[in-house]
Image (spheres, grey):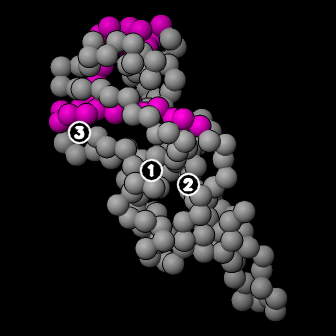
Amino acid sequence: MLKSKQYGWTLDEHAKGYCCVFVYMRKDTTATQPCAEEEVRIHLDNPNAAIAFQKLLVEAGYKYEPLTQPAKNFKVVINNCFGGFGFSDAAKHELCDAGLDVEERFSRHDPRLVEVVERLGDDANSKYASLKVVDLEGETQYFITEYDGSESVWTPKTAPWKGDA
C-alpha cells in the first residue's frame, strides 16, 4: 500500500496507456481534523505526458514505490532504427487475421503483435523500420521513448531519472 508522498506506475488494464497511482493528503480548511489520505489514479495515454507527470511528482518530493503486481515477462515491440515504426504488408495481413487492427491504437506488448514480429523477423518491417522484440524480464511497467523514429524502452529500474533522486 502506498503512503503519502509515494507514487507508482501500472499499465492500463485495457492497454490504452499508463496509470500513475499516487497518494496525497486532502486538505480541508474548515475541518479541525486532518482528512484521510486518498489514492488517486491518473490515466495517461501519452508517454511524454507520463514522463512529465512523473518528473513533477519527483520535484514535489514523492518517492517511487513499486506497485505490487505479479511478475510477468513482458515482451514489447519497438523500432530499432531511425525512420519510424511500421509494418510490411505481410505483417499487416497477419495482424489483421489475428484480430489486431493496425490502423487503430494498439499495445506494443500485445501478444499477437509480439508473436507476428518474432515469427516474421525482418519480413515484418516496413521500408524504414527495423522492428525488435524486447523482453522486459519481470518488469510490468515501461515507457517507449523515441528520437527521429528510433525507439528505446525504459522501465522504472532503467529510467534516467530515478524516483528516489
Residue 155 has which mark? 1
Secondary structure type for disc 1: loop
Is label 2 in contact with label 3 (beta carbons under 8 Å)?
no
Q: Which residues are magenta?
A: 72-97
Secondary structure type for disc 2: strand
Horizontal side, residue 66 vs residue 127: left or right:
right
Residue carrying label 3: 150
Q: Nearer the viewer, residue 133 or 96?
A: 133
Say above or below: 39 vs 125. Answer: below
The label nearer to you, 3 versus 1, is 1
Amino acid of disc 2: Trp
Q: Residue at x 50, y 19 (%)?
A: 112
Residue carrying label 2: 9
Amino acid of disc 3: Ser
Magenta stretch encompasses residue 75: yes
Give the CA separation, mark 1 to mark 2. 10 Å
Give the CA separation, mark 3 to mark 1. 17 Å
